[in-house]
Image: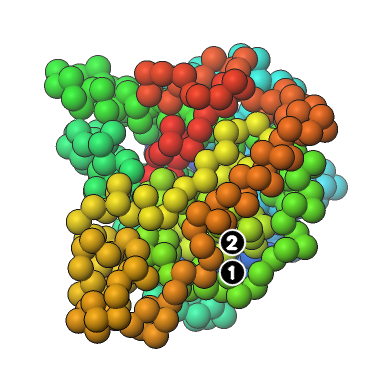
Amino acid sequence: MVGSLTPQRALVWFKRDLRVHDHAPLVAASAFADALAIFIIEPEWLSSPDCDASHVDFALTCLAELRIALAERGLPLLVRVGSAVPVLAQLHNELAFTHMLSHGETGAAWSYARDRHVARWCASTRINWQQFSQNGVVRGLRNRAGWAKRWQARMDAPLHLLKNKFCATLSLDQPALPTIVSLGLLPHGKTLQSAGEKAARRTLSSFVKVRGYGYRKALSSPLSAEEGCSRLSPHLAFGTISLRTVHQATELAIGNTPERELSYALRGFAGRLRWHSHFMQKLENEPDIEFHNFARVCDGLREDAFNNNHFEAWCAGQTGYPMVDACMRSLKATGWLNFRMRAMLVSFASYHLWLHWRQTGSFLARQFLDYEPGIHWSQMQMQSGTTGTNTLRIYSPTKQALDQDPQGLFIRRWVPELTKVPLPYLAEPWKMDPSVQRMAACMIGVDYPLPIVDDKAAMRAAKDRMYGLRKTPQSKMEAEDVQDRHGSRKSGLPNSGQGRRPKTSRKTPQASQQADLFA
């Protein structure tokens, strides 16, 4: 800075914040006489059980746009492959940066370990590493009292906007971005949402101005949700738009919208933005929940009963339950699925198939383009009944088919084996007589599998186990402890815009009330 005895050079380290607008580290770096930026493609990320080639593909597309946007502002963006500390150390030897600026991250275990390693390196080399918040997650939070007020203050604060171009003095070699193949990954084959900050801002604009009208009605069905949900979740996960930008645009639209229907819908969405950070805060406070049950009384509940054949059938969309299979195949093809159907997939895996949430959660993390560790692992446990506090929600796949796809359009689209099955049998094709099966060109057990479990019997067995466990003194004691650590009762959070209190004595939000956490 001005008056310093040594040259001051700032390095902006991009992680999951691939944007220019509302970017505090960029604004801070603009006060330095010299600056540069870096994104590191880390082997620890690529080899993690949660990473998929689709994630990397999306990030690379974002980086291509970001590099151009930064160059227009005079800031070079380096993209290097390697573990963070060796890459940063080499760059420090080459360019002698004195300050490193980044957003704080509430990520998976590998990124948490990485950040601790980087912090030690910065301390040993006397690099001033400043981390800025970019959402409502509070680092070092001891309890939830007043959390919502902090969230509100952050979201209402002015956006961090660059006012001047950088005066970078460095002439850096910037080779072309790597490709999926050069990084040793196989093509993913998914049809993904458009990537980058421009796409994020277009998506936000179309939602608060037009698509949001049908938001509340569109949430539950996978058909209507495809267009009616915000579709901002991948952009929030990769940081191509900030939560604050989404919040302020939503509040502005609510204030400027005379149409009651749109205003009402957007208020529901605005409430869910708060729950978005609420769930991330859980992982920030207790990183162990990525691997262990919230309620340790649930330890051993499913670990020894894992059925790999059931797991593989569920992953492949070959369970014999059309709605489950359609949702899984749709997710694997597009990287997105609306929240109610995600909850049904996890419920079916956890209760009907009695599979542990770690294995199913890792698989789903790779499928979800919008994988956000804090939300993902909290929801995996919530839908599996291992939080010890939330009301158990065990979805009937047949009922969900009848309720959310009454004309069978979604099922026929994603399970073509059932294309000619008469509508009265589409949710339960195993009930067709052999003659009807022949007419439909779909022999159950040959062209489409028989149900791998009996729906009603599996639900009864799961309820007996789960409710029996919850009646024990140990379970009740642990539920109080989990609520004290992570509950929302003192936070002042809204009731997700639903206009009624959740049906649970612990005031913890139910699945259906956070239907846009991933939307």
Residue 225 location (% of width, % of height): 29, 47
CA distance separating discs 2 and 1: 8 Å
Q: How is the image coloured?
A: rainbow
Q: Which residue is rendered at x = 69% and y = 65% of the image?
A: 306
Q: How many marks?
A: 2
Q: Position of residue 374 (x, y in %)?
A: 60, 43
**Label 1 residue SS:** helix
**Of the residues under marks 2 and 1, which one precedes in the sequence?**
1
Which numbered marker is on residue 311? Answer: 1
Q: At 52% from the left edge and 29% from the top edge, which residue is drawn?
A: 509
Asked whether 60 or 263 is in front, the reply is 263
CB-based contact (under 8 Å), mark 2 and mark 1: yes
Location of residue 297 in the rendering, given as x and y in whole percent from the top left corner: 79, 41
Position in image of residue 1 (x %, y %): 62, 33
Q: Residue furthest right?
A: 124
Vertical position of residue 156 compared to residue 135: above or below: above
Q: Read off the residue under disc 2.
A: 353
Where 143 sits versus 206, above or below? above
Mark number for residue 138?
A: none
Of residues 181 and 169, the one nearer the viewer is 181
Relative to 426, is 190 on the left or the right?
right
Residue type beneath disc 2: Leu
Determine if residue 517 is in view: yes
Mark 2 surroundings: few (<14), some (14-19) or many (≥20) residues within 10 A: many
Q: Residue at x 20, y 56 (%)?
A: 407
* Left or right placement of residue 380 versus residue 319 in this view: right
Nearest to the eye among marks 2 and 1: give it. Answer: 2
Depth order, front residue of 205/342: 342
The three-letter amino acid code for the residue at tag 1 is Phe
Crowding at dot 1, Cα within 10 Å, few <14 / some 14-19 / many 20+, comes out as some
Q: Residue at x 14, y 18 (%)?
A: 258
Secondary structure at badge 2 equals loop
